[in-house]
Image: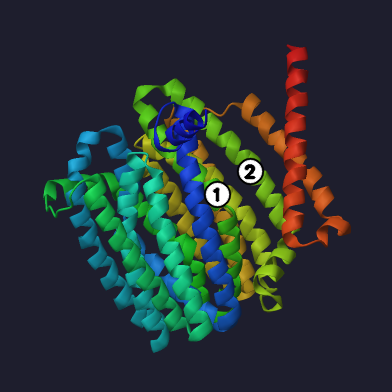
Amino acid sequence: MKLEALSNVKKFLFDNTTVRQTISKNYFWLIAGAGINKLLKMVLIIYAARILGVTEYGKFSFALAFVSLFIVFHDFGLPATITREFAREKEKEKEFYSVLSFTALLAVVALTLILSGSFFITQDPGIRIIILILALFSLINGFAVVFYAFFQARQRMEYQMWAETLQSILVVGMGLFVLFKMPSVENFSYSYLFAAIISFIFVLFFFNFKIFPLRICWEKSVWKKFFIMALPLGLAGSFGSLYSYTDSVIMGYLGMINETGWYNAAYRISFTAFIFIGLISSSFYPVLSENFRKSKEMLQKVWNYEIEIIIILVFLFVTGGIVLASKIINFAYGPAFFPSILAFQILIVTTGITLFYTTLKDLLIVANLQKKFFIAIAAGAIINIILNLILIPRYSLYGSAVATTITHSLILITLAIFILKYTSIRLSIRKVGLTALISLISSFAMYFIISRPEIYNLNVFISIIIGAAIYFLAFFSLRYSFKKLLLCLN
C-alpha cells in the first residue's frame, strides 16, 4: 500500500494525465517555488529596508525601476510566445536555438538603452553604478525566463521551481551576508548579480544534459517569425513597464527618494501577497493554449474554473490586507515606514484588479489577439503617465498609488469588452456571479471579526490565520446553503 501511495504521489507530481490533474500539478510546482522564492526574497527586502534605511532603499528601488523600464526590450513578449507555440506543436522546439540567439541580440539593445539613459535620469554616479549592476542582473534573469517558458510549454513547472529556488537561496544568502557584514546599497546590488550568474549556469547545464544539447543557431527566418508573433506582446510589455515603473522613476527624478522607498516597500508586500494567486494563471495558461484548438467547450470550462478560484482568493486577500495594513507594515518595516500604510491599502486593491485582467489577457493571447491586449496596455500607459505627472507632485506616493489603481481598472474594463466582442468566451453570470456574491458576504464576515480589538491586537500572523479561517468557513457554509436553495427552487 505504501509503494502504491508513493507511486500515486509521484504520478501526480510528475505526469500529465487529466486536465484538472495537470493544472493542479502545474500550480503545485509553481506555488511551491513561489512560496519559497517570494517569501525568502521578502525577508531579504525587509532586512534591506530596515538596515539600509528609507533613503538608501529608495535609491535601490529607483535604480531597479529605471532598469525595469528598459528590460522589456529584452523580454519583448518572447516567453509567452514560446510557451504558446511550443505547447501547441512540439516539432517547433528545434527553433528554440534561434530564439536564444535572438534573445542575446535583444539583450545588447536593452543594455545600450539602459546605460545611455542612466546619464539623463540621474547625476549621482553611485546610482548609475547600481543601475549597471541591476541591469546585468535583470538581463541574465531574462535569459533564464526564456528557458522557463520552454519548461512551461512542456508543462514541467518543477524544473522552473528548482532553478528559481536555487537563485532565491543564493540571493538571500549573499544579500543577508552583505547587509550584516558590509551594508551598502551597491554591495547589496552585487549580491543579486552574483546569485543570478550562478543559478543561470545551473539552468544551462541542466537544459543541456536533461532536455537537449545547447547550440547557437542564427536563422533569421525564425527571428522574423517570432519577432512578428511577439511584437504585440513586446509593445504591450513596453507600455506595461511604463505604467508599472514610471511612478518610481518620476519620484526618483523629482528627488523624492524617501517617498520612492516608502512606495516600493508597500508595493513589494502587496504584490508578493498576491503572487500565489497570480500563479494560478500561469498554471492554467498552457492548458488554455492547448484547448484553444482542441475544444472551445473545454476552453470555456477551464476558464470558468480559473476565474472562480481567482474571485474567491482576491476577496480574501484584499479585505484582509486593507484591515491589517498598519500591522503588516509595522511588522515588516517598523515605524520609519508608516507612510507606506495608506499606499499599501490602495495598492492591494490594485493587485486584485490586476489578477482579474490577467485571466482576460491570457485568453486574448491564446486566441492570437495580442494586438487587442496591446491597445489596452498602450492606452493604460498613456493615462498612467498623465495621472502620475499630475498627482505625484501634489500627493507624492499616494498620488502614484491612486494613478495605478485607475489605470488597472480601465485596462480591466477594456480587456473585458475585447473578450466579449472578439472571442466566444462568456462569463457565466449565474455560476460566477454566485461565487462573487458568496465571496463578498464572506469577506464582510471576516472584516467584522478581525477588526475587533481582541483579534486585531493579536500577533499579525495569528490575525491572518483567524481571518482566513473565518472567510473559508463562511464561504463553504454559504455555498452549501445556496446550492441547497437552488435545488429546492428548481
Secondary structure of the residue carrying tag 2 is helix
Secondary structure of the residue carrying tag 1 is helix
- The image shows residue 33 at horizontal and vertical percentages of 47, 52
- The image shows residue 210 at horizontal and vertical percentages of 26, 47
213 vs 186, left or right, is left
Residue shown at the point (72%, 54%) measured from the top left:
464
- The image shows residue 366 at horizontal and vertical percentages of 37, 36
Q: For the residue marked with disc 2, what is the amino acid? A: Leu
Q: Would you say the residues marked 2 and 1 are in contact, meaning their CB atoms lie under 8 Å apart?
A: yes
Residue shown at the point (30%, 45%) measured from the top left:
150
Q: For the residue marked with disc 1, what is the amino acid? A: Phe
Q: Quadrant of the C terminus?
A: top right
Whether residue 266 is situated above or below residue 75 in the rendered picture: below
Q: Residues within 10 Å of mark 2 (few under 14, many from 20)?
A: some
Residue shown at the point (40%, 66%) measured from the top left:
68
Task: Give the numbered dot on residue 276.
Answer: 1
- The image shows residue 434 at horizontal and vertical percentages of 69, 29
Task: Give the numbered dot on residue 46.
Answer: none
Whether residue 312 is situated above or below residue 76 in the rendered picture: above
Task: Give the numbered dot on residue 313.
Answer: 2
Whether residue 140 is situated above or below residue 314 in the rendered picture: below
Mark 2 vs mark 1, CA separation in Å: 9 Å
Between 460 and 381, the residue placed more toward the observer is: 460
Q: Residues within 10 Å of mark 1 (few under 14, many from 20)?
A: some
In primary-sequence order, the first of circles 2 and 1 is 1
Whether residue 379 is situated above or below residue 179 in the rendered picture: above
258 vs 365, left or right, is right
Closer mark to the observer between disc 2 and disc 1? 1
32 vs 439, left or right, is left
462 vs 95, left or right, is right
